[in-house]
Image (cartoon, helix red, strand yellow):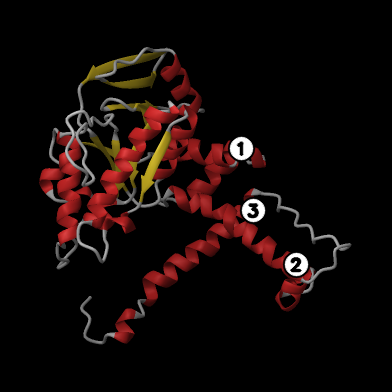
Amino acid sequence: MIFLPAIFSAKTRTLCLIIVRKSPDPFNTFREIITSHLFSWTKLVISLKIAHSEQRVVQHAFTISTIPGIWGGKGQGKSFQTELIFQALGVEPVIMSAGELESERAGEPGRLIRERYRTASQVVQNQGKMSCLMINDIDAGLGRFGNTQMTVNNQIVVGTLMNLSDNPTRVSVGQDWRESDVTNRIPVIVTGNDLSTIYAPLIRDGRMDKFYWQPIREDILNIVHRMYEKDGISRDEVEKIVDTFPNQALDFYGALRSRTYDKSILKWIDDIGGVENFGSKFLKRRKDQNLPVFIPPEQTADALLESGYSLLKEQQLIMETKLSKEYMKNIED
C-alpha cells in the first residue's frame, strides 16, 4: 500500500493522503484527485483510489489534528515521497532536521521551531504559495532510547510542538504581545522510525495523527520500476532484482544505481591518469584544454544485480564482525 501525503492548505490544518493500490503512476493519480475536487478550508480530505473491477474514488472529510506523523521502517522513502508531493503541488516547505532540536543554548531549538513556523506563514502571506513546516526523523532528536536522559531543550521542543498544535495561530518568538499578531495556521509534518519513543502527550490522539508507512511487495515493484524506467529496465527485470534481494528497504534499490556510477567513475579516473593526476587534469589545465568527459554508465539488470551482491556483502560483514566487542571486552550480547 502506498500513501502519498501532502499539504494543500496552508491556512488550516489540512492534509491530503492518497492511498494507491496497484497504480502504475501514483503521482499522476494524486494530481488528478487534487485538481478535480474542491477542498474545504477546515477539513481533511483523504482520497482512497481502490483498484477493483472498476476504479472509484471514495472521499472522507473530517477534522484532524495539526501534526501528522508519518512513521515506519528506515529507508522506506517517507521523507523522499513527501518532498516529491510538495514539488508536484507547488508547496514551499520549511524543512528542519532532528539535528536542530538540540543546542548548547537552552531554549534555542524551541525558538528556532517557532521562527521556522512563522517563516512558513510569511511564505503564504508574502509569496502566495502553500507552505508547511516539516521535521524529519523527529524520534532521533526527541526519542528516549535505553538510558538516554531528557534535556531542557528536549522538554522545550516538546512543549513548543504541543503549543503549536493547541494554538496554531498564536506563535510568539519573544516580541511584545500584540492582539493583532495572528499567524496563518501552518501544518506541521513530522517523520520518524519509532514514534513510541516520543513523549506520549505529544503523540496523543487529537494532537498528532499517526500514519504507518510499510510498502508491500507490489508497491516496491511499482516504485522501483518507476525509478529505473528511464534507464530502460523492464518490469520483469525489476521483479527479478526485488526477488533476488528480498526484505530490503527502498533505499537499497536506489543505492544499486549509485554503486554502478561509483564503479564507472573510478574506472574513468583511472582512464584519465589516475587519482595522482586528477587534480592537475581539472585545476591546472590550460585554458585551451578541454575538461575530460564522463559518459554515464548504461544501466542493465546484470550490473544492478552485481551492485546488489556487493551491498549485501557489506551488510553481512557489518552484522557478523561487530568490532565493538573487540574494543569493549565486557560488552554483553
Say which amino acid is labelled 1. Answer: Glu
Q: Quadrant of residue 256?
A: bottom right
Q: Are marks 3 and 2 in contact (CB under 8 Å)?
A: no
Tell me the quarter of the image containing the N terminus: top left
Residue 129 position (above or below residue 68): above
What residue would you read off at disc 1? 229
Q: Secondary structure at mark 3?
A: helix
- Residue 28 horizontal/vertical position (percent): 50, 24
Residue 286 image label? none
Residue 236 position (above or below residue 145): above
Which of the pair 175/254 is nearer the observer?
175
Rounded to the nearest angstrom, the CA distance separating label 1 from label 3 is: 16 Å
Residue occupying image coordinates x 57% and y 37%: 235
- Which label sits in the foreground, 1 or 3? 1
Lower position in the chain sequence, tag 2 or tag 1 = 1
- Residue 167 horizontal/vertical position (percent): 16, 34
Say which amino acid is labelled 2. Answer: Phe
Residue occupying image coordinates x 14% and y 47%: 159
Rounded to the nearest angstrom, the CA distance separating label 3 from label 2 is: 33 Å
Say which amino acid is labelled 3. Answer: Asp
- Residue 83 horizontal/vertical position (percent): 44, 39
Lower position in the chain sequence, tag 1 or tag 3 = 1
Q: Are marks 1 and 3 in contact (CB under 8 Å)?
A: no
Q: Is residue 3 visible?
A: no
Q: Residue furthest left?
A: 201
What residue would you read off at disc 3? 302
Tell me the quarter of the image containing the C terminus: bottom left
- Residue 191 horizontal/vertical position (percent): 31, 45
What residue would you read off at disc 2? 282
Residue 282 position (above or below residue 49): below
Which of the pair 296/114 is nearer the observer?
114
Q: Quadrant of residue 118?
A: top left
